[in-house]
Image (spheres, grey):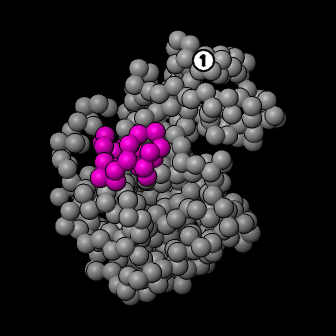
Amino acid sequence: MRQQRLLQVELHGDSVATCFTERVPNRTGSESLSVAGLFAGIGGVELGLHDAGHRPELLCEIWDSAQEVLAHRFPGVPLHDDIRSLRRIPKVDLITAGFPCTDLSQAGRTAGINGEQSGLVAEVFRLLRSAKPTWLLLENVRNMLPLDGGRAMRYLIEELEALDYRWAYRVVDSRFAGVPQRRHRVLMLASRSEDPCSVLLADDAGNPPDEQWRGDAYGFYWTEGLRGLGWAQDATPPLKGGSTIGIPSPPAVWLPWEDTGRKIVVPRLEHAEQLQGFPVDWTIAAGGGDRGRGPRWKLVGNAVTVGVARWLGARLSEPGSYDGSSDRALALGDRWPNAAWGGKGQAWASDASCWPRQEPYSHLTDIIAPAEAVPLSHKASAGFLGRTSRAKLRFSEDFLLDVKEHVAFTAG
């Protein structure tokens, strides 16, 4: 993994210069696709697509700190600030839109698809009425599948089909790309002329065996402890821009074999960048420092994992095949499964797993070396311990003993 990161930095330097009975043929071939990135954030999708041979032609992002990163990493690419004032998109092959999850995520307001922020996806459909891309990629949190009885997904599908798009979606776990971050996101791919299933559903490695995960590190949310924990073996839970106590924060990591005072630690910012698949200091242009100073933690927490986009970009260049003959039809009102496809008012559930591939895995302590991590503060660990005492959750006795020991040690 370390060698791979060095190669990436050397490459990029300071910047990066039918799913129906009658199948729709793919004509993408091995082409380099032109890309317009909407809600681009810090360019996780764009970097992954670039690594797969594709090229950004337009970026759109409203947050000034993210704009600074994009301008630094993608110099010369036109950068627009507000999608609401974007009148047209240049002729491109692929439009991507990781639209805001604020109203859809469990850590957000859960106001739904028509919320003030997540509702901005309507601007994508406005632009699609005049744009003619071969492909459209939407990305968001897994929680949008069950939220409001599946209303968000019904809205997206209705809008796509009104524009004569066929579609497929799939929940993927970022760990398939080799990073130790258990991060589930919905990828939704649509096209008027091509087969989305041959890209999004063609690969399936299946869930890995439990033996893959080492027992020397466990990630969890220290900002929780009452109703959830985000527990992950040999991985962190999803990095995120906010928390249940209202602050952008890194998760914590339990290292049961470490010395007292270093058993409960938090990753540094450069670890977070690597957990998302970015080279170290990818966000340096945004200013600020480590451990929550400045906007960089939130920028990284909101990003798309680079390796996920790299896999998708490779499949866009070389589509595979998908046999959906055993998939089951979905009826109106059915729960949205982890993967599905459809068009023209029809939809089918797929058994595709969250693991399209199994890339070589970097274990959590390969990235977060214990000597480089920061012990969780006394205030944070004491607050977490207090919440666990009021919770109905079950905790490992060894884990709670180490938390209590850490609280006592850091009190001095």
116 versus 87 height, above or below: above
* Mark 1 Cα shell of 10 Å, populated few (<14), some (14-19), many (≥20): few
Residue 278 belongs to magenta span: yes
Question: Could you tell me residue 174's position as x and y percent?
Answer: 47, 44
Residue at the far front in the pictured view: 412
**Of the pair 237 and 171, the residue shown nearer to us:** 237
Label 1: element kind? loop
Residue at 41% across, 83% down = 85
Q: Is residue 259 left or right of residue 357?
A: right
Q: Is residue 144 visible?
A: no
To which quarter of the image does residue 348 belong?
A: bottom right
Q: What stretch of residues is rendered in magenta?
A: 276-297
To which quarter of the image does residue 94 belong?
A: bottom left
Q: Main structural element of the magenta stretch: helix, strand or loop? A: loop
**Of the pair 31 and 16, the residue shown nearer to us:** 16
Residue of label 1? 412
Residue at 50% across, 70% down = 167
To which quarter of the image does residue 106 belong?
A: bottom right
85 versus 379 height, above or below: below
Question: Could you tell me residue 253's position as x and y percent?
Answer: 54, 28
Which of the image's four quarters has the C terminus?
Answer: top right
Which of the image's four quarters has the N terminus?
Answer: top left
**Of the pair 25 and 282, the residue shown nearer to us:** 282
Question: Could you tell me residue 64's position as x and y percent?
Answer: 38, 64
Q: Is residue 291 visible?
A: yes
Residue 411 belongs to magenta span: no
Which amino acid type is marked by label 1? Answer: Gly
Q: Is residue 241 left or right of residue 317?
A: right
Residue at 56% across, 57% down = 141
